[in-house]
Image (spheres, helix red, strand yellow):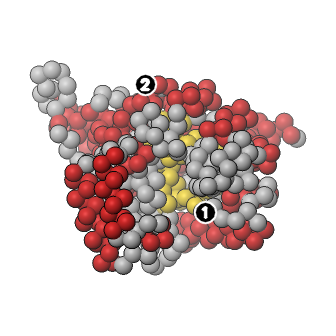
Amino acid sequence: MIRQFSGRPWARSLSLLTLLTGFTFLLSCQSGSDGTMTEEEVLAHAQAIHAEAITIDTHNDILGNWGTPEIDPCTGTDMKVDLPKMVAGGLDMTFPAVYVGQGPRTPEGNAAVKEAAMEKFRAVHRVAEEMCPDQVAIAYRADDVERILSEGKRVYGIGIENGYAIGHDLSLVQQYYDLGTRYITLTHSGNNDIGDSSTPRGEPAEEWGGLSPFGEEVVREMNRLGIMIDLSHVSDNTARDVFALSQAPVIASHSGAQALASAPRDMNDELLQLLKENGGVIQIVALGSYLQDDPPEKVEATNALREELGLTDRGAMRNMTDEARATYQARMEEIEAQWPGPDVSTFVDHIDYVKNLIGVDHVGIGTDFDGGGGIPGFNDASEAMNVTVELVRRGYTDEEIKKIWGGNLLRVWREVERVAAEIQQQAT
C-alpha cells in the first residue's frame, strides 16, 4: 500500500545533519526479505532526494484575480498552487500560465486577447516584485533558478498558453519575451493563426495542415529569442512541422503518453520518438482524463448526472449555485467510488512509459494544477513529494529522479538559450 503525504512541510534544503540521519537510517533499517526497500527506507530516501532535487512544475493556471488580496499566493489560497503549498511540498519552481482562451481572429479579438495576456503578466510581476519579493522571484534564464533558490526563495517561470495571444503580430513575441516569457504553447482549444490544434472545436481539422506560414515565422523568432516551443495542445501535423523546423529542442509542458490514454493532447509513439531525436522533453500532466480512459459505464453515469442537473455545457458548469455544486460533487464522489480514476501511481505509469520508450532524459512534470489537474496522491503542490516516493518505490535512481523533477527541463532551457545566442551571433 502506498503511504501518501499531504501538506507536510518538507524544507527545500535539509540540514547536513538531517541528511546524514536519513542516510544512516537507510543503512540501519532492515530491507525486505526479497531485497526491496521497506516502507521506512522508501520514505527516508525519498525525503533526502526530494530535498536535493530542483523540483519544477512547468504548468499551473492562474485566475483573473490571482495576485490580488482576493487570491494572494503569498499567504495561501484555495487554489492548488500557492507559495505555502510549494514550501509544504518541497516544490521549488512553477510556471504560472499566461493562459488566454481562443477567441475571434480579428483585429478586435487580437487587441482583446493581448490585454488579457498583459493582465496576467502584470499579476505575476506584481506577486514577485511587490507582494512578496522575499518569497519568490522570476527566472529569466536557466541559471537564475539555482541562484534564486540559493537565496531561500521559490521560483516563477512564465509561459504563455495559446499563441493566439500573438495574434498576427510577430513583434509581440519579442515583447512577451521581454516580460519574461520562456515558453509559448502554440495553440489551445481551436486552431489559430500559428497552426492547427489537437482539438479544433468544429473548425476544419486541418485548416493549415500543421504550422501556418506565419507559424513558421513564430517558430523561427522563438528560436532566435530563446523561447521554448511548447507542443501541448497542437495537432500531430503541427508538431511534425515544428520538429522539422526548430533548431532548438522543444517541450510539451503538460501532456501524457497516448498509448496509455487516448486524449488528443497526449503524444503518440511517433511524436515521442521525434521528441527524442529533437532532444526535447514531455512534462507529464496530472489530469485524470489525460492519464487514463474512463470505462464506458463511468462515462454513461457521468453524462446522465450532468443531464439530470442541467450541466450540459461549460457555461452551466461555471454558473452553478453553491447548492448545485455541492450536489454535483457528492454524486460524482459516488461515481468515483464505483469506478476509481487515476492516482499518483497512474501518473508515474506515464513516466515509466516515456522512460522505457525514449529514455529518462526526455520526461518531466507539468501538472496543469488549477486548470483541471489534480489526482489522488498528487492533488496540489503540497503533495509533490508523493511523486518522489513512488519513483523511489519503483527503483528510479537518484540521478533519474533529479532529471525528471527539473534537470531535463533545465537542460532543454539551456540548450534553447545556446541556440538563440548562436543565431543572434550569426546575424551580426
Q: Is residue 179 above or below residue 15?
A: below
Residue 69 x, y percent position in the rendering: 46, 79
Kindly identify which residue carries mark 2.
356
Which residue is depicted at the point 70% across and 36% down? 241
| Left or right of residue 206, residue 284 in this image | left
Q: Is residue 394 above or below residue 192?
A: above
Q: Is residue 301 shown to the viewer in this render?
A: yes
Q: Quadrant of the C terminus?
A: top right
- Under circle 1, the secondary element is loop
Amino acid type, callout 1: Val
Q: Nearer the viewer, residue 40 or 375?
A: 375
Q: Quadrant of residue 423?
A: top right
Q: Is residue 57 above or below residue 119?
A: above
Residue 242 x, y percent position in the rendering: 69, 38
- Under circle 2, the secondary element is helix
| Left or right of residue 291, residue 345 in this image | left
First in sequence: mark 2 vs mark 1: 1
Residue lying furthest top = 34
Q: Is residue 163 above or below residue 343?
A: below
What label does residue 365 carry, if any?
Answer: none
Q: Residues within 10 Å of mark 2 (few under 14, many from 20)?
A: few
Which residue is depicted at the point 13% across and 26% down? 32
Residue lying furthest right = 428
| Left or right of residue 96, residue 25 in this image | left
Q: Quadrant of residue 160?
A: bottom right
Which residue is depicted at the point 59% across and 46% down? 198
Q: Quadrant of the N terminus?
A: top left
What label does residue 100 carry, if any?
Answer: 1
Amino acid type, callout 2: Asn
Residue 360 x, y percent position in the rendering: 46, 29
Q: CA distance from mark 2 to mark 1?
A: 35 Å
